[in-house]
Amino acid sequence: MQRRDTKQRRLVLENIQSRCDHPTADEIYLSVREKDEHISRGTVYRNLEYLSENGTIAHLRFAGIGRYDRNTVPHNHLYCVSCRKVIDVTGGQAHTEWDQAVEKETSYRIIGHSTVFEGICPECLKKKVSVCNEGV
């Protein structure tokens, strides 16, 4: 069954496509709500689910929090454990040798993978350094 394209779905998709971050469903809802005050949280969540299931957007999970990405090409991410910001890591390859090694070891057919690097972003590092230096 093909679903029809709705105004609400277009608003949700346009919102994600206009962003460079990896927003949560709530962040998307609040942003879309500025353009359509009648849109419900459930409508936004259902459209996010639909768009991610059909591959139009990517649904990611970082530390148990669902986020969305306009970039559906396999790539890696960097997650700040302090402020929970997520950014794309553009350097690096798809690691096809790694996929092949895991496939050989497990007999799974690997269709892709992503790597999440965890760290502390420069902004959070500055905050920690300035807080530590205040008592000196």
Image (cartoon, rainbow, N blue to C red):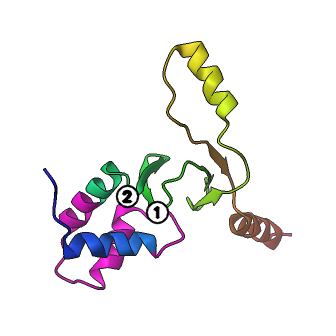
Q: Residue at x 35, y 53 (%)?
A: 52
Residue 96 position in % (x across, y down): 65, 33
Q: Is residue 5 magenta?
A: no
Residue for badge 1 = 70
Q: Is residue 31 magenta?
A: yes
**Quadrant location, the C terminus:** bottom right
Give the residue type at disc 1.
Arg
User: Looking at the picture, does residue 99 appear above or below residue 106?
Assistant: below
Residue 69 position in % (x across, y down): 47, 60
Could you say whether the residue bearing mark 1 is in a helix, strand or loop?
Answer: loop
Q: Which residues are magenta?
A: 18-47
Q: State the residue in front, 56 or 19.
A: 56
User: Looking at the picture, does residue 124 appear above or below residue 58?
Assistant: below
* 128 left or right of 101 in image: right
Please tell me how crowded label 2 is: few (under 14), some (14-19), or many (20+) other residues with Cα within 10 Å: some
**Can you name the residue that lies furthest to the left here?**
1
Please tell me how crowded label 1 is: few (under 14), some (14-19), or many (20+) other residues with Cα within 10 Å: many
Q: Residue at x 46, y 63 (%)?
A: 70
Residue 98 position in % (x across, y down): 67, 29
Mark 2–mark 1 distance (CA, rounded to whole Å): 8 Å
Give the residue type at disc 2.
Thr
Residue 2's tag is none
* 106 left or right of 65 in image: right
Among the two numbered marks 2 and 1 on one chain, the one whose residue lies closer to the N terminus: 2
